[in-house]
Image (cartoon, rainbow, N blue to C red):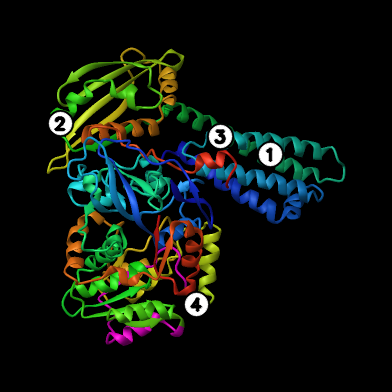
Amino acid sequence: MSTQGRLAPALGWFGIALGAAEMVAPKGVARAIGTRDHALVVRAFGAREVAAGVSILSRKNPAQGMWMRVAGDALDLAALALCTRRPENDRKRLAAAIAAVSAVALADVYAAIVATRAGNGVPKRPALVKSVSMMTSREALYERVSDASWLPEHVPGLSGAAVAVVNEIAPSSLQYEIAGLPGGLGLTLRATLTDQGAGRGTALRIEAVPGTKDTANARFVRALAELPGDALAFGLHRLKNVVEIGEVVSAAGPSGRRIRKQGAKG
Amino acid sequence: MKAAIWWGIANVGVDEVPDPWIVNAQDAIVKVTLTAICGSDLHLYNGLVPSMEKGDILGHEFMGEIVEIGPEVKERKVGDRVVVAFPISCGKCFFCRGEMYSLCENTNPNAGMAEKMFGHALCGIYGYSHLTGGYAGGQAQYVRVPFADVGTIVVPDELTDEQVLFLSDIFPTGYMAAENCNIQSGDTVAVFGCGPVGQFSVRSAFLLGASRVIAIDRFDYRLAMARRAGAETVNFEEVDDVNDVLKEMTGGRGPDSCIDAVGMEAHQPGAGAIYDYVMQQMRLEQDRAIALRQCILSVRNGGTVSIPGVYGGYGDKIPLGSLMNRAIQTRTGQTHAQKYMPALLGRIERGEIDPSEIITHRAPLEQAPQMYETFRNKSDECLKVVMTP
């Protein structure tokens, strides 16, 4: 990890330690910074410090937690500035505290900006990759999936979508160009078929990729949001049913739920 | 038709619901002639299996007569008298081809839900929550049986319903548990829990060549039934430490195999039980793994722990150090019932075993609510309930 990358976690641990001290010994902290006994306020500030620290350390990208710290620093400085107006407070200690908080605030702002920039570099599109193995040959499965109708038929959220098959490399891979998603969005899915060998059938891997027609990242992200991984997995399970058994397996049958709706039970 | 319906925790009713119908081409409709309450149904009854919905029809142990078949049913016909295996299995997927029927990849339409819970999905099961597909169960007058060619076995007229019903689950389950122990001549097998699966584990261990079987429970009437099958017995409420007793009985070495035929609702005497009960009620653990802990700690070095008892989620304080350092093997799984049914039917026909001997209660389906309560409370020396729709 780079020095820049280590700064945010260090500040996170610093915040937790300081916050814990404020929560455990608020009077001591208040005296150290030159104010009267404001135990309740100091405890509340301590809890805020701990929360920000936990946020920084528990997330992949600490930007949100870092900006929480920056906001907290502003609050600390405002509170300290108010304290300087009261003659009974120790102005020298307050000045030292303001200097210390200002220095930490600068570090916080720097780390927050670094984390935000790093976060912007991380692709925000959700991963959409699902695989399923089916007991059939790669050639037979390729023939089946090169008819794209299984997507709108079995995948929730794609019913009514127009799907075209492009970039066919039989029997290894092909792509589906999907249009007509809600909001006029489009999506491209790449299908890859791999022989699993030793009587284990063929693996079908479906992955969302930036498409040839719609490469605008924001639109791509929105299109993926319309097709969560669970929906694709559900559709692949149904396709597997069709390939291996010849139809989609259903658990439909009688139950007492209708009785409950009528209020007779439960 | 009438069916036993789950209406909530400890709330089973018998109500009128629509008859089942053919949905898929390989379906059959079976008119149920005899059905049973399984020990694992009590986990549903007690609300410990997630994803039950009010109105679900219970039951995965049943048999009857085929009254209707779908167009793709090739090896069964209307009029066949069949026992139905509790796992719903397609017969075509990777796992079915390997005779691992309870791991069928095609029959659980709620596979995504099961994957979130267990990492991977298991097969569909009749009347056993929506994690296993949400299929209607067999404690009913009629039931839809998907993949009838794969999931049923035709039984001969000479055998009574009571003799063959348990081919549906608990006999194969006890048998697979014993088979998983890889029993060798001279072996001693300890069976924890003398409920129905425990009873069949005892009998199956002997069928597979065990020299000694030690059965452990806290109810004398269950231990007495195990003794009638030839087992030595230990009432764990009357001894200080089961592990010490088993060591003493096996020359200090421990049983070659231990079978946990108890599962998620185990009991133990003393304050230790409170810990697991509180943890389970707070949902900090789903499984009171008391019997599993004892199995691991009791089995000899390099021995086998076989787990037919049902677990549903996460257990606490599993002695992994003992498991690893003493080279203990574990074998478990929902039963691949279809794999065992033909051979076990043969054993019944040859008179090697009479499964009906474990039945203690017979009742019409209408009495399902009372029978669930009786079985749950183990009152009236209840061990196995069969019901006639």
Relative horizontal placement of residue A21, taking residue B178 as reference (left or right): right
Task: Give the magenta-colored segment's residue range.
Answer: B238-267
Q: Say which residue label 1 marks.
A: A99
Same chain letter for marks 1 and 2 = yes
The chain containing the residue under callout 4 comes to B
Q: Say which residue label 4 marks.
A: B269
Q: CA gap, disc 4 to disc 1?
A: 64 Å
Instruction: Check disc 4 and give the amino acid type.
Output: Pro
Q: CA gap, disc 4 to disc 3?
A: 51 Å
Q: Say which residue label 2 marks.
A: A138
Q: Residue at x 37, y 51 (%)?
A: B138
Instruction: Check disc 1 and give the amino acid type.
Output: Ala
Q: Nearer the viewer, mark 4 or mark 3?
A: 4
Instruction: Find residue B111 and report its horizontal and vertical position in percent.
Output: 35, 41
Q: Quadrant of residue B293?
A: bottom left
Position above or below: B171 against A188: below
Q: Nearer the viewer, mark 1 or mark 2?
A: 2
Q: CA gap, disc 2 to disc 3?
A: 47 Å
Q: CA gap, disc 1 to disc 3?
A: 25 Å
Instruction: Give neighbour class at mark 2: few <14, some 14-19, many 20+ (Cα, 10 Å).
Output: many
- For the N terminus of chain A, which image quadrant? top left
Q: Residue at x 80, y 40 (%)?
A: A83
SS for dot 1: helix
Q: CA gap, disc 4 to disc 2?
A: 58 Å
Foreground residue among B229 and A114: B229
SS for dot 4: loop
Q: Say which residue label 3 marks.
A: A64
Position above or below: B20 against A189: below
Q: Nearer the viewer, mark 4 or mark 1?
A: 4
Instruction: Give neighbour class at mark 4: few <14, some 14-19, many 20+ (Cα, 10 Å).
Output: few
Instruction: Give neighbour class at mark 1: few <14, some 14-19, many 20+ (Cα, 10 Å).
Output: few
